[in-house]
Image (cartoon, rainbow, N blue to C red):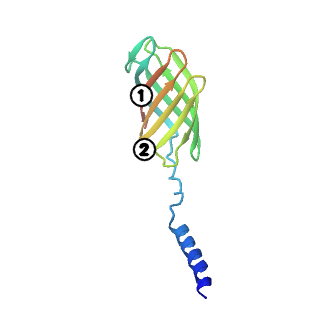
Amino acid sequence: MKLQIVPLLILSLAVCAGCTAPGTAPAAAAPDLTGNWTGSPQGYSEGTGYFGSNNTLALQVTGQQGRIFSGTLSIVEANGSISTRHIAGAISRDGKGFTLVQSDTGYDLGTVISENEIELVYVTDQDPATVAIDSFVRNS
């Protein structure tokens, strides 16, 4: 009889341990990033050095399905020229961080600061290697 109780006790402990083990938490609701955002960069570019907010940035998120989004990023240079890049991004499970790729240039690691404010940290190892912090607010 004692031999039958031991395996039953071990099985019960294993089941209980499985019940108390941490599980995968469900993903947070993805924030809605669609809309028009304006911002300015601050960064460093190899060969030219540090730069401030002489440029204006316009981020337009035109589509979003769950945690995936797409759109364009336009950079208005100090001389008035505009370069536009297609972007695509993915929002993290916690709904606070995201990663964005810019066509033919580099990547951004993003943070949702509030419903109407985001920050991007841009990196590229293309010539010239550049890093920038881009702060954006949603246009109302």
Q: Nearer the viewer, residue 125 or 51?
A: 125
Quadrant in the rendering for residue 101: top right
Q: Position of residue 81 (x, y in %)?
A: 50, 14
Quadrant of the image for the C terminus? top left
Q: Position of residue 21 (x, y in %)?
A: 51, 64
Above-or-below relation of 8 to 37: below
Which amino acid does the dot numbered 2 rest on? Glu
Above-or-below relation of 120 to 128: below
Using the image, tell me which numbered label, if any, was put on residue 41: none
Q: Nearer the viewer, residue 29 or 109?
A: 109
Query: How many labels were placed on the picture?
Result: 2
Taking the image as drawn, is residue 138 in sight? no
Quadrant of the image for the N terminus? bottom right
Q: Residues within 10 Å of mark 1 (few under 14, many from 20)?
A: some
Q: Position of residue 138 (x, y in %)?
A: 43, 36
Quadrant in the rendering for residue 119: top left
Q: Position of residue 78 (x, y in %)?
A: 43, 14
Which amino acid does the dot numbered 1 rest on? Ile
Taking the image as drawn, is residue 53 in sight? yes
Quadrant in the rendering for residue 117: top left
Using the image, tell me which numbered label, if any, was put on residue 133: 1
Q: Nearer the viewer, residue 57 or 68?
A: 68
- Judge left or right: residue 136 versus residue 92: left
Q: CA distance from mark 2 to mark 1?
A: 19 Å
Above-or-below relation of 19 to 64: below
Q: Which residue is mark 2?
A: 115
Circle 1 SS class? strand
Residue drawn at x 56%, y 29% as measured from the top left: 72
Circle 2 SS class? loop
